[in-house]
Image (cartoon, rainbow, N blue to C red):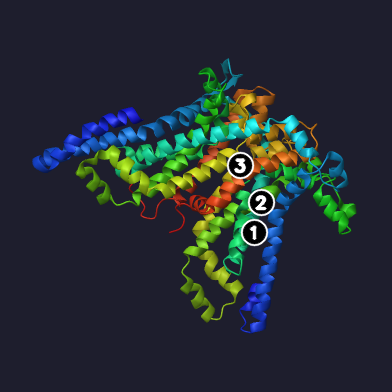
């Protein structure tokens, strides 16, 4: 950037100096300079995003309708989409994504309660806050590594169960299709605690304390205040964390699945994003991978549009 | 919850008990959140036999880790990839954020939306076109391909964050600097950049943790001999022949840099995650 920028920078100065003397003409020259600087400065970001995200999206849509191995692509056409919706494997994979959505209420509800506890500001709450947020800094790879040991047949969970006398109920959760998905969901919920608690705690800090004070004077208990006053006022934050949680459930679990279960057993923990990897790398069907990619993209785009609405700056328009 | 309800009543004793109940509950949650870390540390310092018996500690796990994984080289790879990607993200997001906030031109709103909407694209959706494209221009045989992908993935949110931040700086300040003869580019470098250091810190911390912890890009865009520590660890884990203690040792060493950054810059991280939500 430096060379071109330096050139325009030196070019601008005389124009700016003249402004006071020749009034309107100089002013329009100034706004032209400004426009040019604006275009120049926004160009690198645009180029990067278009070249590495925009164009590949177009390619993915095209290749989704082909049989492609990375070198040669044979055109099949839009019929791949009708074929896809008749494919039982597709629905098996989508079922896993849908089941993972059942974890979302827990991934939101538990952090809500934790944020409410932190918001009581008992002694040492800052320390607890740091501890609860810590998983935010940890990679899914490391979390998955622990989770695998936690849920394994000889792992922590079964050990714990046998210690408290439930040894008979010990199972290898990662060996069953549905139990493996449950194990994945629990790990996912644990991992989301940090992020969602941050969001809710920020939300609670924005609340007007006189409102809860008034409710207390009116004789409402703390639980009643939480459900009737605090919760409704947090709606925007809950929506925001809902979107983030759904996006994570659909597109951030690759590493967790890769380390914990590799998608198995069977199709037990193969979600859309993981099937893309399997189709591409294990079966070298890049076309199929692109097809699933487009489906995932459409789902994420819908969630993303909701998110963009939610994080829009308060004064509304102008962008 | 029961504890909270009780404290509504005025008795001093009840209130004290409620606080203790609350405190106990918070300790229990802390144990649940910290246990994995304790497990990883505890079992990193064992041999395979000591792990099976869950008794005794040694450095055998670490020796095994260093024998199976080029730890130092991969930590260096992680650092270099992070630094290069973040540098690009900072350059393009501060310039573009400033342009979208202060140097609007016809269509700049559309360009902004275009850049930010790239947030919605999960890498998985475009991963094979991306790999083929970058392979065609010979960028997947070095750091370059992965760095570009990280930069492109981080740019939309960083640009959004920077634009939001620059919108908070008064137009008059910028105009005054320009009329004083600084020109737009130098106003950007000498006025806007210093003012936006908090936002730059937020972007840096957020991206560092994201890129350091990432597996997807590192696994598929870096050549095997230039893998990051996270990718190295994941491939070691799926190798199935390795015993648990070296994996725990690897987890520990790969997590430490991100934890340190988190502990030092916690405030910036929190700000970035909740951007646009609070006031």
Subunit under mark 1: A
Q: Earlier in the sequence, mark 2 or mark 3?
A: 2
For label 1, the crowd category at 10 Å Cα-Cα, with few meaning under 14, some 14 to 19 and many 20 or more, is some
Residue A120 location, x and y as percent? 58, 69
Report whether residue B107 is seen. yes
Q: Earlier in the sequence, mark 1 or mark 3?
A: 1
Q: Is residue A68 left or right of residue A47?
A: right
Q: Nearer the viewer, mark 1 or mark 3?
A: 1
At x 62%, y 82%, the residue is B9
Q: Is residue A212 left or right of residue B224?
A: left
According to the picture, the residue beneath numbered tag 1 turns out to be A110
Badge 2 and badge 1 in a common chain? yes
Residue A319 against residue A162 in the figure, above or below: above
Residue B145 location, x and y as percent? 53, 26
* Secondary structure category for the residue under label 3: helix
Task: Farthest residue to the left: give it.
Answer: A21
Q: Which quarter of the image is occupied by the N terminus of chain B?
A: bottom right
Task: Farthest residue to the top: give it.
Answer: A72
Cα–Cα span, label 2 and label 1:
9 Å
> Who is closer to the viewer here, A28 or A146?
A146
Badge 2 and badge 3 in a common chain? yes
Cα–Cα span, label 1 and label 3:
20 Å
Q: Mark 2 and mark 1 in contact? Answer it, CB < 8 Å.
A: yes
Cα–Cα span, label 2 and label 3:
13 Å
Residue B247 location, x and y as percent? 74, 38
Q: Mark 1 and mark 3 in contact? Answer it, CB < 8 Å.
A: no
According to the picture, the residue beneath numbered tag 3 turns out to be A250
According to the picture, the residue beneath numbered tag 2 turns out to be A189
């Amino acid at each position: 950037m430096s060379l071109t920028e330096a050139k325009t920078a030196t070019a601008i100065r005389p124009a700016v100096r003249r402004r006071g003397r020749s009034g309107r003409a100089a002013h329009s020259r100034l706004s032209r300079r400004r426009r040019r600087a604006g275009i120049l400065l926004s160009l690198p970001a645009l180029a990067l995003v278009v070249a590495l995200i925009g164009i590949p999206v177009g390619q993915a849509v095209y290749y989704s309708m082909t049989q492609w191995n990375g070198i040669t692509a044979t055109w099949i056409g839009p019929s791949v989409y009708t074929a896809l919706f008749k494919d039982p494997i597709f629905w098996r994979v989508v079922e896993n994504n849908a089941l993972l959505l059942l974890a979302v209420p827990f991934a939101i509800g538990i952090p809500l309660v934790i944020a409410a506890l932190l918001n009581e500001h008992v002694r040492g709450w800052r320390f607890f806050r740091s501890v609860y947020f810590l998983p935010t800094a940890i990679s899914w790879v490391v979390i998955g590594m622990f989770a695998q040991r936690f849920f394994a047949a000889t792992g922590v969970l079964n050990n714990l169960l046998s210690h408290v006398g439930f040894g008979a109920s010990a199972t290898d959760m990662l060996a069953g299709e549905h139990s493996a998905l449950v194990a994945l969901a629990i790990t996912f919920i644990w991992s989301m605690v940090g992020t969602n608690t941050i969001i809710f705690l920020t939300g609670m800090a924005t609340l007007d304390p006189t409102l809860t004070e008034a409710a207390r004077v009116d004789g409402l208990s703390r639980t009643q205040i939480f459900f009737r006053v605090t919760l409704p006022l947090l709606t925007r934050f809950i929506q925001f964390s809902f979107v983030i949680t759904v996006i994570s459930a659909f597109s951030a679990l690759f590493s967790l699945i890769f380390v914990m279960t590799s998608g198995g057993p069977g199709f037990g923990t193969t979600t859309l994003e993981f099937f893309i990897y399997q189709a591409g790398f294990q079966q070298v069907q890049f076309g199929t991978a692109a097809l699933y990619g487009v489906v995932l993209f459409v789902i994420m785009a819908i969630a993303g549009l909701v998110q963009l609405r939610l994080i829009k700056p308060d004064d509304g328009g102008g962008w | 919850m029961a504890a909270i309800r009780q404290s509504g009543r005025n008795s001093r004793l009840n209130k004290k008990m409620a606080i203790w109940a609350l405190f106990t509950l918070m300790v229990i949650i802390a144990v649940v959140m910290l246990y994995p870390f304790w497990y990883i540390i505890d079992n990193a310092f064992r041999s395979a036999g000591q792990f099976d018996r869950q008794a005794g500690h040694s450095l055998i796990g670490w020796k095994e880790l260093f024998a199976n994984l080029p730890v130092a080289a991969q930590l260096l790879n992680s650092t270099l990839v992070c630094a290069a990607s973040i540098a690009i993200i900072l350059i393009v997001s501060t310039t573009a954020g400033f342009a979208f906030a202060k140097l609007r031109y016809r269509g700049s709103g559309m360009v902004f939306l275009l850049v930010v909407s790239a947030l919605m694209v999960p890498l998985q959706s475009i991963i094979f076109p991306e790999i083929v494209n970058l392979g065609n221009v010979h960028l997947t045989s070095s750091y370059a391909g992965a760095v570009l992908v990280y930069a492109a993935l981080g740019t939309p949110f960083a640009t959004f964050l920077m634009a939001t931040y620059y919108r908070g700086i008064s137009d008059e300040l910028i105009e005054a600097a320009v009329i004083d003869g600084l020109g737009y580019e130098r106003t950007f470098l000498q006025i806007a950049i210093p003012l936006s250091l908090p936002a730059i810190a937020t972007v840096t911390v957020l991206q560092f943790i994201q890129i350091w912890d990432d597996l997807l890009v590192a696994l598929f865009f870096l050549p095997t001999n230039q893998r990051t520590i996270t990718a190295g660890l994941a491939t070691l884990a799926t190798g199935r022949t390795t015993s648990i203690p070296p994996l725990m040792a690897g987890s520990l060493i790969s997590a430490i840099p991100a934890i340190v950054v988190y502990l030092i810059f916690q405030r910036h991280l929190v700000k970035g995650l909740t951007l646009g939500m609070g006031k």
